[in-house]
Amino acid sequence: MVLTYLFKNLNIFKSKANMENAFKLRQQLDSIITYLSPLLPLANCHMVEFFTHNHWDNLLPSDLKQYLDNQELNDATDQFWKCAKGEQDDKNELRNWVLNCQSHSVSLNNDYCISRTQLQEKIKSWGGDIKPEIRIKEFMTSKKSYEVQTMSNLVASLFSASGSTHCVEAGGGRGHLPVALTLAYHLPSLTVDCDHRTITNAENRVKIIQKQWHAIAKKIKDGSEESISESINSDLHRFASAFITEHTDLAAILREKFPEHSDTDIRLLLTGLHTCGNLGPASLRILSSRSHVSAALTVPCCYHLLHEDTDHQLVDVFQRDRGPVASGRGFPMAEHLRGYNIGRNARMLAAQSIDRVVHYRQLPDKSLLYRAVLQVIIKTHLPDLPLSEGKLKGVGAKCKDFKEYFKTADEILKLGLYDNLPDTYLMDLGENMNCQWKKIVLFYLVRLCLAQVIESVILLDRLLYLYENGFEKVYLVKLFDPVLSPRCHGIVFVR
């Protein structure tokens, strides 16, 4: 199938290298999907239904389940941490599972998935200058400051390599990234966001940052911080309120916000940190269809907000009714994957960070167990009760044990069960908590391994979409430390 498609569409590939990379990319996607597809029921399950749907017996691979059944919780979790870090050499089913998931995930390959250093080398080869990093110490979280520092100099360097005249930030919200682009690198930049109130607040906030710029911003040179003495132009960063779809004319919005440049030959560098949900695919469709977009560097997030054709069929424990999404299909983008669907819960899982969980050895919160046990009680005594998502969020952290959780949840959901069930009923539930906790924890960790696999399909699908549209200078680049910033990959495009 792959070869047939390639030979029919040779005209879209501009070079032998482009064709070879597209072929390798399709092969990798096919391999990942072959591995992932039988596991989608596991990826799409809801932890609330862990006991009511018997996830442990019904969804885990039998060999892995049998192995975990015979392990103590502490021994199994210790093995998991070591396996995930590559420190476990003993062959067993848990190690096999972890390694298989890792092997079916995107990794640096020097072809279409490159490192940040490799991107800098490519920018140099395209005629760009690598700009110094800028660290902004105030008005941002430490995570956002790190992301802006890491990404802004690459955007500025790409700007020079692509001959762009303006930057446009898609879904910028507070405009964190363009603050550095305008004040540190003097690039005229426009932040576009659909929330008018967010835009208004951001404009006021940027004015404060501009006044304090020389006190809060430092240039990083040879690993050391230096003060910034250059004057700034406080009129280079502007804002627009608009809902971006694939049909949005960003050049027209930019000309409206920069009327002094209305006669300029506009060449846009499209960026976004982070492009949420369908905004990511919409941004890629804009750059593929609009010749005035000369380059792009975007980082996606919020995969659960992507739209798939099957989303309208979604009926789950919370009886969601999402309806059609106006901004078009978010997944898949590539023709090669047309008709393939992942599922909303799997997309939500893809946004979880196994790197961070492993680094900090984070076990799930006890509320995960409490909510699943509560579901058993509800389905046993009130089987027809409609439930609303999110009403119990944060309740578990405030409760010292399940009895207190049950009482609090009973009041919030107005169940009328707590005072009417005998004490022996709760005692019987409590006796099984340790065994249930072991299964919840190990199931959570095993399922979490699929997050990197699912995210790889989503990212590689977007890259393949650009290959299918005939573009050569497109790469997936690992920008950030995944422990600090779990959505660590960006998509780079130069026309």
Image (cartoon, rainbow, N blue to C red):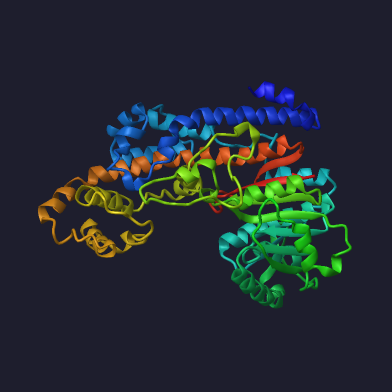
Residue in front for this viewpoint, 479 or 390: 390
Residue 184 visible in the displayed image: no
Does residue 311 sit above or below 181 in this rendering?
above
Identity of the residue drawn at 16% across and 53% down: 426
Identity of the residue drawn at 38% across and 28% down: 92
Quadrant for residue 139, please give it: bottom right
Q: Is residue 329 left or right of residue 353?
A: right
For the C terminus, give its image quadrant. Answer: top right
Residue in front for this viewpoint, 420 or 211: 420
Residue in front for this viewpoint, 178 or 115: 178
Identity of the residue drawn at 65% across and 76% down: 204
Identity of the residue drawn at 62% across and 38% down: 461
Counting from the top left corner in percent of width and height, residue 166 is at: 79, 60
Counting from the top left corner in percent of width and height, residue 11 is at: 79, 29
Counting from the top left corner in percent of width and height, residue 491 is at: 67, 46
| Tag count | 0
Counting from the top left corner in percent of width and height, residue 20 is at: 73, 27
Residue 326 visible in the displayed image: yes
Q: Is residue 124 left or right of residue 53?
A: right
For the N terminus, give its image quadrant. Answer: top right
Does residue 397 sit above or below 86 in this rendering?
below
